[in-house]
Amino acid sequence: MNYVKALNLIATLKIKREQEKKFIELSKTIFPPLANETGWKLTSLRTSNKLTDDIIHIQNQWQTNEDTTERVEKVLSQAMENLAQSIDGYQQQLEMLDELIIEESLHYANSYTI
């Protein structure tokens, strides 16, 4: 078993089904520059039952290069600040994405491979 020291930042989100296309559109413009700026890898998972669920559950798992929560938060904050200053409209897109989110929680996790 190989233990990975770097933390994963996991953002668990809920959005309304009718907002899914808008969420995906905004995600495509927000997350690639953020991944590039931080050097982190993003894996997104979406779960719902299309026949019965009005809410979509999204889990964005960022594989960071950082080994403390303080460092993750500092790198993320600095990257978002840099992008807001260097990409026209980036801050507004972040705000629009935030408005689509009904509920959000953040967690940190370590991982290992077998």
Image: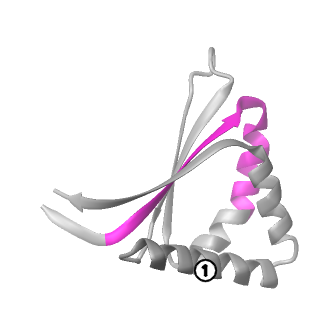
Element class at badge 1? helix
Q: Which residues are magenta?
A: 6-29
Looking at the image, residue 77 sits to the left or right of residue 113; the answer is right
Placement of 77 over or under 60, stated as above or below: below
Residue 97 shown left or right of residue 108 in the figure: right
Q: Position of residue 10 (x, y in %)?
A: 48, 55
Q: Which amino acid type is shown beneath numbered disc 1? A: Glu
Give the mark count. Answer: 1
Residue 53 appears at what percent x and percent y? 63, 21
Residue at 80% from the left image edge and 83% from the top image edge: 85
Q: Is residue 68 above or below residue 56?
A: below
**Residue farthest toward the top in the current orientation of the protein:** 52
Which residue position holds label 1? 37
Is residue 21 magenta-colored?
A: yes
Crowding around mark 1 (Cα neighbors within 10 Å: few <14, some 14 to 19, many 20+) is some
42 in relation to 45, above or below: below
